[in-house]
Image (cartoon, grey):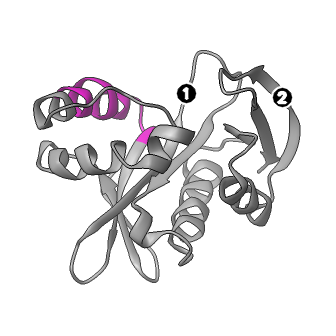
Amino acid sequence: MVSIHTKRLTICPLTESDTDFIFELYNTTGFKRFVGDKQLHSTQDARHYLTKNLMSMYETPGMGLFRIALQGDDIPIGICGLIKRDSLDDIDLGYGYLPAFEGQGYAFEAAEAMMTLAREEMALRRLVAITDSANARCISLLTRLGFSFEKNQESLPNGGYLALYGIAL
C-alpha cells in the first residue's frame, strides 16, 4: 500500500520514524483505558512494539494500522486500519487518536477511507469493530459510519463489556 489522501489527511504505513508518536499515542489516558495498556514504558518499548506488532501486520496486503497525518504539515494525529484478530471471524476496523485531534471529524474521514479500501480493493463484504461498551465516542463514530451493535463479545475487568459492531459492505 502506498498512501491514501483524503480531503484533510494522508494515510500511510507506519515506519520506525514514528516511534515517538506511537509512544505518545499509546500512553494517552484514553488509549490505555479503551484500547489497552501495551506496557510501553520507554521509546525502546515503543520501537519494539511498532516493528514487531504493528509493522508486521503489513505482510498481508491492506492489513494493519496506518499512520494518519494532517496534509500539509504531515503531523501524525492517530492510527486507523484493518486488523485480523484471532478472536474475530471478520476483519476489524481499529483506530485511535491523540486527544488534541479528537472531535474534529478526522477519525470519521480516515475510517471511511479504510472502509472504501476494504470494499473496493480487498473485496471484503463485511467489517466489524470492537469497543468497550463505556466508550461513547467510539460507539457514536461507529454508528455514524453505519455499524450496528451485534452483541457483547466478552466481559471486561472494569465491569463493562467488549461490544461487537458490524457492517455489511
Labels 2 and 1: the sequence-earlier one: 1
Q: Nearer the viewer, mark 2 or mark 1?
A: 2
**Which residue is at the front of the view, 169 or 106?**
106
- In which quarter of the view is residue 117 placed? bottom right
Q: Secondary structure at mark 1?
A: loop
- Residue under circle 2? 152
**Which residue is at the front of the view, 39 or 60?**
39
Which residue is depicted at the point 68% across and 38% down?
132
Cα separation, mark 2 vs mark 1, equals 19 Å
Image vertical order of residue 116 relative to residue 157, above or below? below
**Which residue is at the front of the view, 59 or 89?**
89
Image vertical order of residue 109 relative to residue 58, above or below? below
Camera sees residue 139? yes
Q: In the image, residue 115 lies at what x, y percent?
A: 62, 55
Q: Main secondary structure of the magenta part?
A: helix
Which residue is depicted at the point 42% across and 81% down?
8
Indicate the amino acid at tag 2: Asn
- Residue under circle 1? 84
Camera sees residue 62? no
Q: Which residues are magenta?
A: 48-64
Farthest top residue in view: 86
Q: In the image, residue 59 lies at what x, y percent?
A: 34, 28
Q: In the image, residue 64 lies at what x, y percent?
A: 42, 38
Mark 2 surroundings within 10 Å by alpha-carbon count, few (fewer than 14), some (14 through 19), many (20 or more): some
Indicate the amino acid at tag 1: Lys
Q: In the image, residue 141 lies at what x, y percent?
A: 69, 62
Q: Is 163 covered by the magenta stretch?
A: no
Farthest front residue in view: 158
- In which quarter of the view is residue 94 placed? top right
Which residue is depicted at the point 27% across and 46% down?
22
